[in-house]
Amino acid sequence: MKLLNTLQRVAKRARQSLADKQQRQFIERHATDLIHAPVGEDRYKAALYFADEMVNAYQIRQWYEPMKQLSDFMPIAVITRRPDTALALRDECPLPVYYAPTVEDLERLVDSQDLRLMFYVNQNIQNFQMLRFNEPKHVFICHGESEKSYMWSNQLKAYDFVFSAGQAARDRLTSQLHNFDVHERTRLIGRPQIDVSYVAPFSPNPALPTVLYAPTWEGDRPSMQYGSVVSHGEQLVDALISDGGFNLIFRPHPRSGKNSAAYGKAVERIRRKLAEANATSSAQLFFDDTTDWGWQWSTSDFCVTDISAVAYDFLATGKPMFVTRPASSEATVQDSPALARVPSLSADASENAPSLIRSAITESNMDSREVVEYYFGDVTAGASMRRFITESLKLVVGDVQAEQLPLKKAA
């Protein structure tokens, strides 16, 4: 069996190597815009660095619109290291995409451009090949606010600055990350994604409340086992379908099933259940594998999610939600004001979800405004986007000049 697995891995690497070679050749012949470096005033002043494969593109997609609005003030590009990712982003990303497969390519780009700011959305090991350059200011923007241990990784020390959502992030870093000057190296920007207008791909039955179930993936180590699809998900979905009184958006994490075949199979079972029930249900049951993240917030009346960035994105809406209680005792669960005030949902209670959700929708939570402010600051329309743009420009042109620029309100 071990020999068979080894041979399969070797064959997979060989196929990937051949595909990479063919894609590189295609870029050199037919997608030369991916290796074009502008000159003069069009030279890039900032870049969004993404060295990952497309399975993790959800991390960069949520930054398209904030970066697009920032590009009104200076030229911005996306830097990618993989040929398949470069070609895929070329088709969907509203910003110029630059393909830099080698360190030498990165050096040529840095030498030819006026790069002053470099943004990072994850902790890919290839980030360090860009971090070796002293000139751009390196800023970690992450891909969402959460209480996962990822949020206080020691790797944050590698960046010049960390753009955090609100005071909660600063307090978290103060208590968890040693030898890190939080006030000097963090900038509070809120959540600019909430200031973007999104178009929903489906229309729920307006007579019924809409529930968003958006679990995270199974994790790649015991401390990150927050995913609820196996422990809660099927019971929860079965109960909501059987009740018939709720529209349902089921949005599994894009990485679901990558580390656990059982987790991936559970996602597929839920997909089939929704498709079968849709044929006869008056409710709209939607399996959400769209690339856009944001329309779900305004479409939904209630959310069930795990300890993940989704919980904090939905928190900013002020709408009610449940955060699932991890079934694994090894999952790291930190005390937090959000988790303390948001009701939790145990695996055993999943089958009673319809009645629990109905009660929660009718109740008012007076604590939510205080918690939202603690995690995100001012969430009035346009406020987060303006803070993101202002803090970015301060690092490029200085505090005084940035404050004098006429910042547009979010669309």
Image: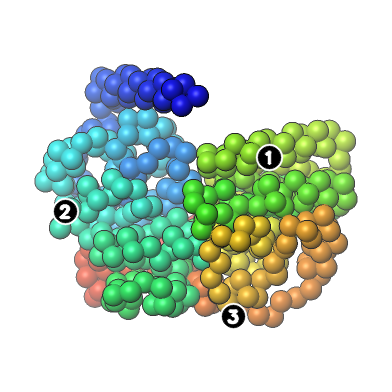
Q: How is the image coloured?
A: rainbow
Using the image as rendered, state which of residue 10 and residue 183 is in the foreground. Answer: 10
Q: Is residue 267 above or below residue 161?
A: above
Apparent side of residue 108 relative to residue 278 in the rendered image (left or right): left
Mark nearer the N terminus (1 vs 2)? 2
How many residues crowd mark 3 within 10 Å: few (<14), some (14–19), many (20+)?
Answer: few
Mark 3–mark 2 Cα distance, whole angstroms, equals 41 Å
Amino acid on which disc 1 is placed? Ala
Of the numbered discs in the image, which one, if any, rests on residue 133?
2
Mark 1–mark 2 Cα distance, whole angstroms, equals 44 Å
Of tags 1 and 3, which is closer to the observer? 1
Mark 1–mark 3 Cα distance, whole angstroms, equals 37 Å
Apparent side of residue 408 relative to residue 33 in the rendered image (left or right): right
Amino acid on which disc 3 is placed? Glu
Pinpoint residue 148: horizontal percent, then vertical percent.
Answer: 50, 62
Q: Is residue 109 above or below residue 410?
A: above
Asked if the residue under mark 2 is in contact with the one under mark 1, i.e. CB atoms within 8 Å, the reply is no
Residue at disc 1, secondary structure = helix
Mark nearer the N terminus (3 vs 2)? 2
Q: Quadrant of residue 35?
A: top left
Identify the residue under disc 1.
266
Identify the residue under disc 3.
370
Residue at horizontal 69%, vertical 67%?
A: 344
